[in-house]
Amino acid sequence: MFGDTWINMEHQQLSTMCRELKKEKDQLRGSLLREQSINAELIRKCESNITASSEMHKKDKKYIEDLERELRNSTQEIGFLQNQINDNKTQGSKCISVAEPEFGRQKEIELENDVSHIERLESALSSIQLESQCELESMKFDMITLEQRCFEAERLFEQTVQEKTHVEVQLKEAQQNFTSLERENIELQERLAVSERGIKALFSKMESRLDTCLKGKSFPNIDPHWRFDHFSPTDFNENALFIEVSCLCVDNLISFFSKLDAITAWDEGMKGEIEKMTAQIRESECLISQLKEDLREEKLKAKDEAEDLTQEMAELRYQMTEMLEEEHKHRALIEETSLRRIKELEMENCKEKLKCSKAVKHLQEATELAKSRAVDIQKLKNNYSNRSFHDDSDNDESSVTVCTNSNYEVSRCK
């Protein structure tokens, strides 16, 4: 039993060891695969770097060849240009010696032309200023005339307002007269009615008194319904009492008729006055209606004139603003053009001065160069015997140029 347990234990240990070994084997296999993948990536990177470096090396070689070709071409061009410069210098010295007086004369002519052009511009500016001043004076005169017209319009408006107030005062007076006449008419009508009532009462009283007198006395052969208008002179012989009574009645009637005549005359006078008052009232009504119509017409005229004046003032203000704006724009344009032209002339003058200075400088340089050339030619004549020394110096210069080119190629390759 003890041996079996020991065998089982060894078997378990072996199985655990086998499992651990398998795990280690798997780990080693995974690490190996990772290292292989890393190595493959490194190899690919190295290959790509090698190919890139080879391509760069090829490009550098091609660039170096191009530079060498350009260097050869540039050396050839430099030599050709040096020859041209020498030729141009000789030709320029000849041309300068020939064209110097002509160039000076041309510059003097150009300067005179510029001065004359500046004088013309100044005269044009002065004429423009005079024109602008004339336009301003004309505008001031127009403003004065417009102010006068406005003053006249205001004066007319004030006159219309005064006339309107005067007409309104007349209308008020006419209305007051009309009311007073109506009041007097009413009073006269009341007085006429009172007088008519008094006359009627007096007539009724007289009739009642006559009736009482006639009824109170018994007269023979007399109609109890007798009236004074039925009286005849043959009745005086019949009764003396009747004569006395009739005399009294005649006296009373005479006094009554005299009063009645006075009352009727006063009534006729009152009627005439009433008719006159009614005629005056009608005339005042007609006058009031006419004054109202005149006032309405004056109001309409004043309103129309005020509207016309306001419209004219608005139009004049608009025209004045437009004229001022146009004048301002015209002046600004003139100033801008004049300033631009002055600047252009100043620039041209500066350019001409620069050209003159450059020409003078170029002439001085040409003279100095000619002097230096003359000195060099004299030196060459003096040192003509030392040609070998000259050749050695040329060889040294060529070696120096070759060394510089090689150094440049080496630095480019690096």
Image: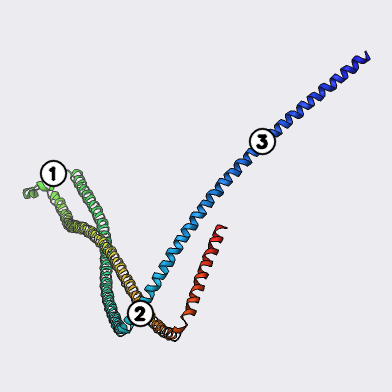
Tag 3: residue type? Answer: Gln
- Which disc number belongs to residue 36? 3
Helix, strand, or loop for circle 3?
helix
Viewer-nearest residue: 112 or 6? 6
Helix, strand, or loop for circle 1?
loop
The residue at the point 84 percent across, 20 percent down is 12
Earlier in the chain: of badge 2 and badge 3, it is: 3
Neighbour tally class for label 1: few under 14, some 14-19, many 20 plus, Cα within 10 Å:
few
| x, y percent for residue 119 | 29, 82
Tag 1: residue type? Answer: Trp
| x, y percent for residue 296 | 24, 58
Q: Is residue 311 left or right of residue 41?
A: left
* Image label count: 3
CB-based contact (under 8 Å), mark 2 and mark 3:
no
Camera-near label (1 vs 3) is 3
Residue underneath mark 1? 226
- Which disc number belongs to residue 376? none
Earlier in the chain: of badge 1 and badge 2, it is: 2
Quadrant placement of the C terminus: bottom right
Instruction: Give the quarter of the image for residue 115.
Output: bottom left
How far apart are the alpha carbons under marks 1 and 2?
A: 175 Å
Tag 2: residue type? Answer: Thr
Residue underneath mark 2? 90
